[in-house]
Amino acid sequence: MNTTIYDREGNELRKATEEEIQHYIDEYLHMPSSWRISGLVSGEPYGYDGSVYMSGGRVELINELPNVDIDHMKALWDRWVNQSAEEFMLYSDTDDIEQAVSEYLDALYDDAIKAQEEWEGPNDLDDMLVAYIQYERIMTQLERE
């Protein structure tokens, strides 16, 4: 599938090259989550004034990325899970990401209760762990294509 560059108003400008697609993806991944919603980047690297966005091909995968603070998400994953997302899902009893995370956190909670420790998990822990697995799966797809 071809990837197309559009101006801010949605007018088709031209087809993107593979190098431009990779540049766009790299730039997009380093944006704050609040900026990623629009998908707009500077048009200058693509030879245009103003903002542009891309659609089609591999670029569609980045639209599926969770809209969360990536650094926060990764920090929570490293602190609470500290294994690859693939390995986490492999050892889970389900293929459903939300259910796997829920069962994992239930087990952590149960272990804390048995050890008579206070549960200290942040309120967004379940959402961030789910987002991490989704993020890793999409990033793996981006690398393969």
Image (cartoon, rainbow, N blue to C red):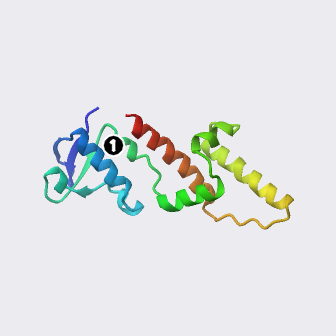
Q: Quadrant of residue 118?
A: bottom right
Label 1 environment density (alpha carbons within 10 Å; few <14, some 14–19, many ≥20)? many
- Above or below, 83 against 124 in this view is above
Q: In the visual, does 124 lie left or right of 30?
A: right
Q: Is residue 118 above or below residue 20?
A: below
Which corner quadrant holds the C terminus? top left
Q: Position of residue 13 (x, y in %)?
A: 15, 45
Q: Amino acid at mark 1?
A: Val
Determine the residue positioned at 19% across, 53% down.
Answer: 45
Q: For the point 22% across and 41% down, which residue is it?
A: 4
Task: Please give the residue where the numbered disc 1 appears in the rendered image.
Answer: 59
Q: Secondary structure at mark 1?
A: helix
Between residue 24 and residue 106, name the one nearer to us: 24
- Residue drawn 64% across the image and 36% down it: 90
x then y, percent, for residue 82: 62, 52
From this view, report whether residue 116 is shown above or below residue 64.
below
- Residue at 83 percent across and 61 percent down: it is 113
Residue 88 picture location, percent across and down = 64, 43
Q: Is residue 69 found left or right of 22 in the rendered image? A: right
